Each structure stands twice: as structure tokens, then as C-alpha cells.
Amino acid sequence: MDADISAWEQRSVVRVVPPVQPRKLAKVPFVELADGRLQGVVSSGSDIARVYVSSIAAGTHAYTCSTNNNRPCGGLYGAPCKHLRALADEAVLQYGLDRVARYLRVEVPAGGDLLGSLSGGPTRAPAAAVFARFLRHLAYLEVPDSTAPLAELHWFPAVR
């Protein structure tokens, strides 16, 4: 291998970064920085069977919020709704304000608010891709403890 390549670039796996602060998963069970967006799943405050898929695009700061079956959020009236606020707050707990702001390409003044620094408006985006990622994430929680490899993860090398 090339001596200029760092050790982490020589492996196909990267260490999982622990959360900046512990967070409760009941309100926002899934948050990620992926696909050019801050995106995640937020539980409904009024119906235990309903969840909202919310996202904020990096760069444009366009935001969307809808149920997992693409019904628009009733609180999205030209400004971020409470689900987007909960998503942003949990992302800051998970990744830290600096990392989230860098990913979204926004300048947050000292003591400022992430959502208050965004310049985008509401848009429509399908929720299916984010919700499918969330369901896949949940499926791994149901896998029984084992040292045997998982069939769909067979291409990850064993790391001690």
C-alpha cells in the first residue's frame, strides 16, 4: 500500500463516532447526515402510530416534513415545523453543532440557533427513501446476538 495513505483509508470500515451528548430516542429515533441532507424520523406528539420524515437540504436549506406515507405536515406553514426543530436539536446532540452546520453549509453565529440561520423554504420530497433507511436500521436491532456474519454484511472484513 502507498505510504501516503492513512490507516483508516486502507480499511473498508470506519469506526462509529460516538454521540457528542447522550440523547433520548423516543422523540427522534433516527437522525443522520446523508444524501446531502440532515434527515430523520420524528415521532408524532399526538398519535403514537404516526411518524414524520423530516429533512433539510445542505446548501439550499430547503426543508420538508411529511408522514411516512407522504402526507404533508400540518405545521409546515412557510417556516420549519416542530418536527424539523426536534430533528435539528437531536442532530446537534448526536453530531455537534459545528459538524451539522458544516454539513448543511450554514454559518451559525456564536450563541445562535441552527434553524434560525437557515435561508431555505419548504419543498416537497418523497419520504420513502429515508423511512426505508430507518426501517433497515430497526431491523438490525432485532438480530439476535451472534458472532456469525450476517449474510447482507458479508463484504465487511472482520476487525478486532
Image (cartoon, rainbow, N blue to C red):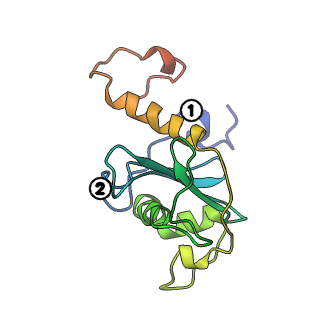
- Give the percent coordinates (x, y) of residue 3: 67, 40
Report, in whole angstroms, how far the alpha carbon at label 1 lies from the one at label 2.
Answer: 32 Å
Q: Residue 145 versus residue 17: which sits nearer the camera?
A: 145
Residues at marks 1 and 2 touching, judged by CB atoms closer than 8 Å: no
Which element is circle 1 on? loop
The label shown at residue 109 is: none
Kind of residue indicated by mark 2: Lys
Q: Viewed as shown, does residue 77 lie left or right of 157?
A: right
N-term-proximal mark, 1 vs 2:
1
Name the quarter where the C terminus is drawn. top left
Residue at 60 percent across and 78 percent down: it is 117
Asked if 97 appears above or below 16 in the picture, the reply is below
Residue 160 visible in this rendered orientation of the protein? no
The residue at which mark 1 appears reads as 11
Q: Residue 29 versus residue 21: which sits nearer the camera?
A: 29
Kind of residue indicated by mark 1: Arg
- Give the percent coordinates (x, y) of residue 76: 56, 65
Q: Viewed as shown, does residue 150 lie left or right of 56?
A: left
Label 2: few (<14), some (14–19) or many (≥20) C-alpha neighbours in 10 Å:
few
Residue at 44 percent across and 23 percent down: it is 158
- Give the percent coordinates (x, y) of residue 36: 67, 52
Residue at 69 percent across and 44 percent down: it is 4
Which element is circle 2 on? loop
Residue 44 visible in this rendered orientation of the protein? yes
The residue at which mark 2 appears reads as 24
Name the quarter where the N terminus is drawn. top right
The residue lying furthest to the right in this view is: 60
Asked if 66 appears above or below 68 in the picture, the reply is below
Q: Viewed as shown, does residue 136 lie left or right of 60?
A: left
Figure quadrant of residue 130: top right
